[in-house]
Structures are given as C-alpha cells and as structure tokens.
Image (cartoon, rainbow, N blue to C red):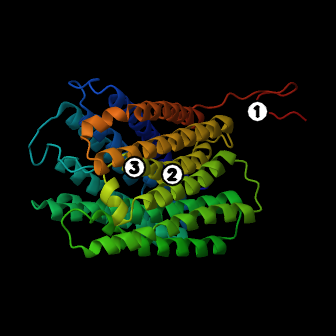
Amino acid sequence: MKYQSQKVALAYFAVALALFAVQVLGGLLAGWIYVSPNFLSELLPFNIVRMLHTNSLIVWLLLGFFGAAYFLVPEEAERELHSPKLAYLQLAVLVIGTLGVVLTYVFNLFEGNWLLGKEGREFIEQPKWVKVGIVVAALMFLYNITMTVLKGKKTAITNILLLGLWGLALLFLFSFYNPSNLSLDKQYWWNIVHLWVEGVWELIMASVLAYLMLKLTGVDREVIEKWLYVIVAAALFSGILGTGHHYYWIGTPGYWQWIGSIFSSLEVVPFFAMMSFAFVMVWKGRRDHPNKAALLWSLGCATLAFFGAGVWGFLHTLHGVNYYTHGTQITAAHGHLAFFGAYVSLNLAIISYAMPLLRGRDPYNQVLNMASFWLMAGGMTFMTFVLTFAGTVQTHLQRVMGEYFMEVQDQLAVFYWMRFGAGAAFVLGAFLFIYAVAVPRREVIQPGEAAGVPAE
C-alpha cells in the first residue's frame, strides 16, 4: 500500500463482506422456502426474503466497487484521496440507508407512504428517502474520486472507471420516475437494471480487472490499455441496444424483437474478450506474484462471467426462444451465474488482492481463500445446471403442454432440493472466504527464530 488514504477501502470492504454474508444466508433461506413453502410464511414471507436477498446483493456490490475505487485510484493517480473524511461520511450515509431499508422491508413499515414506504418495483423497492440518501452518497463519491483523478495522473484505467461510476449514478436517477403506464414504467426500469449490469457495470469490471492484471502479471500498461479500450467499446456497442431483449413482451413495437435479438447476441463478444484478455495477460506476464488467490479469483471472474452472462444469456435471448422461456427457472440460472461470475467474483478478487496490503499481512493464508473459490464456483455452477434443467422442464410442461403453474412446480421439487444443496455449499464457501481475509493467520515461529527476527 503506497498511500495512507487507501485505508478508506478497508471500511468499505468490511461492510461489503458483512452484507455478503446477509445476502447468501437470505438466498439459502429462499432456496429452503422453495422446498418447504410454508416455512416462516407469516413471520418472514418469501417476497420479503427475496427483496433482502437481491437488495443486499446490489448494495454490497456497490460498496465493493466504491472500495475498489478508493483503493486503486490513489495508486493510479499517484496522489492521496481528495478527502478521506468525505469517504467515511459517504459510507455512514449508505449504512444508515441500508439499515432503514432492512427495517422497512422486514416490518413492512409505512406501507403506502410515498416517502417512507417501500415501492413495488423489483430491485429498486427502496423507500424514496433511501433513494435520496443513495444519490447524496453517490455525489460525495463522484466528487471525491473525480477531484483525486483531476489533480493527479490520468490513466485508461481511471478514465474507464470514472465513466462507469458516473454512468452508474446518473442511470439510478430513473428510479425516481414511476409512470402509471406499465409499459413505459418497464422501459425506464430497464434503463437502470439492464444498463447497469450490461452497460456501465461492465466498464467498472473491465477497469478493475485491468488493474488486477497490471499488478498480478507485470504486463506492460500499454498492452493492457489497448485491450481495455477494445473491451469497453464492444460492451457499450452491444449493451446499449441490447436492452431491447427486455422489450419483447411489454407492449413496445415489434421491431424491438429484431434489435434486441441482434444486439444482445453480440453481448457475448465483450465477455469473451474479457476472458481472453485475462488469460493472455497471465500467459504473457513475467511476474510470479505471491498472491495466487487474487489471481485465481481474477481468472475465475473472467471465465464465469463469460459463461454466466455470455453463454447462458445467449441461450434465451433470441425472441423466438424467449417467447417460451421468459420468466422461467432458465432466467434464474442465467441471473445467478452472471452476477456471481461478473461482479461477485470481481469484488472478491480485488478484496483478495487489497485486504492483505491494507492489513499489513501480505501474502496471508491463501489456501482457505482458494478453497472458498472452488466451493463457491462449484456450488454456483451446479446450481446453474440444476436450474437450467428445471427451466427446460418447466418451459415444456407449462409453456408448451399448458399445464398449470403449481402442478409444474410440484414436478420440479427434485431440482429445488439439489439447488438448496448447491446453495449450502456456496454459503460454506462464502463464510470460508470471509474468515480467510478477515482473521489473521497465526504466525509459526521456526526453531532458532525469535519472534519477528528471521533465523540465519
């Protein structure tokens, strides 16, 4: 760690990991409700559990992005953060907002109140006052990071990162507009949800991955920056009009079926380029970096993102296929592997790299960290295949044969049991990761060594 203000990232990573634990436990609870539908049905209904699961995912990923920016920007800009105090204040605002959201969801507070009650729009259910807090926190963050970059050295990594982070904040403003027309509502809703995860978040992913490749492989910056610009251009070209694959069945004109099919098919390209980029950089690299766990997470991120967001996204993105599969467990399969591969793994990669440096115990116990990768990656991959098979059966029985929804759900029970088992393995891996990066490894003093003095 070169700059003192980088320590701000430690607080962000700590809160992010705490919310990560909440998110995976919420997912495991939701998985159990699939096999035992009446479990906690009155105390904690499924819709609340699902809201906590998805919202905690989004918030902890954002905190991870903020922490990553606060860690890497001082190194790239070659100067201290503009204002560490502002960064801590921003974190406090986000934590207060998160607690407000949890209490509002769990106890169903202020229902129907336009300012204090939760809204009914998936992923952006947060009450209005929390959304205002998120915007305030985002403005603090953007001011802090932008001033740091403007006063320091400019690089392709910080330029792309800033573009992604500004886009993230600006697109969130659509959450304040909730038209009464449902088709119009969905059009604007996808401007947040799709253009986040298949637009500006990809820019953040590419820039953070480029930073990790720079540090872990030793490849020349010029080579990495050329790859970065190609990946970002492909992501924006395909991602913006690729939003059309969400416009198939919401009452928009028929030409969106063609626009959506063509451009969303091209969304595979940036993810393939990102995977190729990561492996080529490692192959070209001449540095034997001691942090093997961070390298494993970086390569895993690029690979799983390609399969989850790219391949599984393509499986049901053509309108002729989507007509039958839309909203089935195939969607859940794609969503789980895409989020884990592209963004969860990215955050865990930068945390694996940064935490030992921030805590002064480099390289640290990596065996547990790498074991957690294989547990989480294996659990999520198995879950994805299980949900894909479940979705295929569901599509045939429900959408082709015309059987009733609940009758089909009964026939999918074996898949839901397997999904729960995969989720349990994933949760075990998540807590193993948190332990690996959070708990100091006990130093073993070799015979003939005094504490802190190496043996001759």
Residue type at the position of mark 2: Gly
Q: Earlier in the sequence, mark 3 or mark 1?
A: 3
Q: What numbered label is drawn on residue 341?
A: 2
Q: Is residue 367 left or right of residue 56?
A: right
Q: Earlier in the sequence, mark 1 or mark 2?
A: 2
Q: Which residue appears at 37% of the width and 45% of the height?
A: 329
The answer to which image quadrant residue 323 occupies is bottom left
**Depicted 246 relative to depicted 71: above or below:** below
Q: Which residue appears at 43% of the width and 39% of the height?
A: 20
Q: Which residue is mark 3?
A: 330
User: x%, y% of residue 285?
Assistant: 74, 63
User: x%, y% of residue 289?
Assistant: 73, 52
Q: Which residue is mark 1?
A: 452
Real-space Cα separation, disc 3 to disc 1, in angstroms? 55 Å
The answer to which image quadrant residue 287 occupies is bottom right
Residue type at the position of mark 3: Ile
**Depicted 451 relative to depicted 145: above or below:** above
Q: Nearer the viewer, residue 32 or 50?
A: 32
User: x%, y% of residue 316?
Assistant: 40, 59
Task: Please tell me whether mark 1 or mark 2 is closer to you in this view.
Answer: 2
**Depicted 450 relative to depicted 118: above or below:** above
Q: Which residue appears at 32% of the width and 46% of the height?
A: 94
User: x%, y% of residue 22?
Assistant: 39, 34
Q: Residues within 10 Å of mark 2 (few under 14, many from 20)?
A: many
Q: Are marks 2 and 3 in contact (CB under 8 Å)?
A: no
**Depicted 143 relative to depicted 414: above or below:** below
Q: Residues within 10 Å of mark 3 (few under 14, many from 20)?
A: many
